[in-house]
Amino acid sequence: MQLIEAETGRVIGTVGGSSSHGTAHAGAVYVHRGETWLVESLDLEEHVAVMHRAELPYSTSAREITDISIVAEREHRMWQDCRLSLGEVDVSHRVVSFLKRRQPSGEVIGEELLDLPERSLRTTAVWWTVPGDVLTESGLAAADVPGAAHAAEHCSIGLLPLFATCDRWDIGGVSTALHADTGRLTVFVYDGHPGGAGFAERGFHAALEWLTATREAIASCECLEGCPSCVQSPKCGNQNSPLDKRGAVALLDLLLVGALAE
Ligand SMILES: [Zn+2]
Ligand SMILES: [Zn+2]
């Protein structure tokens, strides 16, 4: 996708096709090499986003709906009652709106709907599940479970580049307190490239080290409620909500206790 300056037609840069919906939609404030631009239009057929330089008192962030379904499990490992899997998934994304946030406070000052098509991707994912009775016995409050899973997902995405040679922008994640295909709490981390690029696979094989490092990164971060160094993600399509830092540590402990017992 080419970024075009409206006044001159000059190409000022490019953005990956898969991220253009979330960052270069009409109305987006686009930061390119430290300069801010306002996107006038995104033409998906011509692969161009037309924009002009603008100093604006707000930033924008897209809201995205992501669905994931399991096509086939290729390998799995039981960590007591928790299950770690590697396999093929279908991921679908749709950017549905964007929020305007006043800078620097971050206060939301408006939301605008977008009409963008769904994109889908068949790729490889690593995922782990925790059965409902294990969650209930652990004492983790049901209301905290979605935020705990989401926070664990974000931090694990942030740390996978230490175990697989990738960039956090090459991978994505989905977490849910109850997934239709597993019937359980499930956290997925998937390769952002069609067919997979081996990152999820590395995650599966290094899962104990990777998820232990994830747990440590969250537990040792000195912030109170979660910050960009631990559980907040710059690419979250859900505006980093809900996130439960303490719940994430408790959830990862449940998973890792099972791994160490095997
Ligand atoms: Zn933190
Ligand atoms: Zn998220």
Image (cartoon, rainbow, N blue to C red):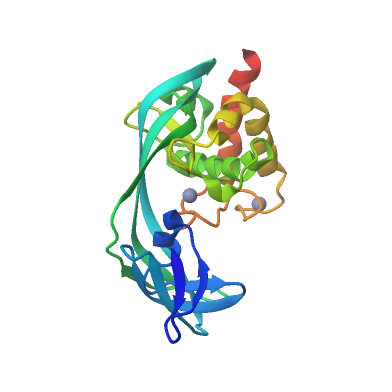
Q: Is residue 30 above or below residue 63?
A: below
Q: Is residue 158 left or right of residue 180?
A: right
Residue at x-position 29% and y-position 60%:
116
Q: Quadrant of the N terminus?
A: bottom left
In the rendered image, which quarter is residue 253 located in? top right
For residue 8, which quarter of the picture? bottom left
195 relative to 31 in the view: left or right: left
**Drawn side of residue 34 relative to residue 23, left or right:** right
Labels in figure, total? 0
Q: Position of residue 221 (x, y in %)?
A: 70, 48
Q: Residue at x 58, y 78 (%)?
A: 35
Residue 158 in the image: x percent, y percent?
A: 61, 46
Q: Is residue 63 visible?
A: yes
Is residue 238 in view from this perspective?
A: no
Residue 23, percent from left and from top = 45, 64
| Quadrant housing the C terminus | top right
Above or below — where is 14 with respect to 59? Answer: above
Q: Residue at x 65, y 43 (%)?
A: 218
Image height of 88 relative to 105, above or below: above
- Which one is in front, 85 or 216? 85
Question: 20 or 250, which lies in front?
Answer: 20
* 1 lies above or below 138: below
User: In the image, what residue occupies the spot 54% across and 78% down?
Assistant: 36
Q: Nearer the viewer, residue 114 or 150?
A: 114
The image quarter in which residue 142 lies: top left
Q: Tell me residue 257's x, y (percent).
A: 62, 22
Q: Residue furthest top?
A: 262
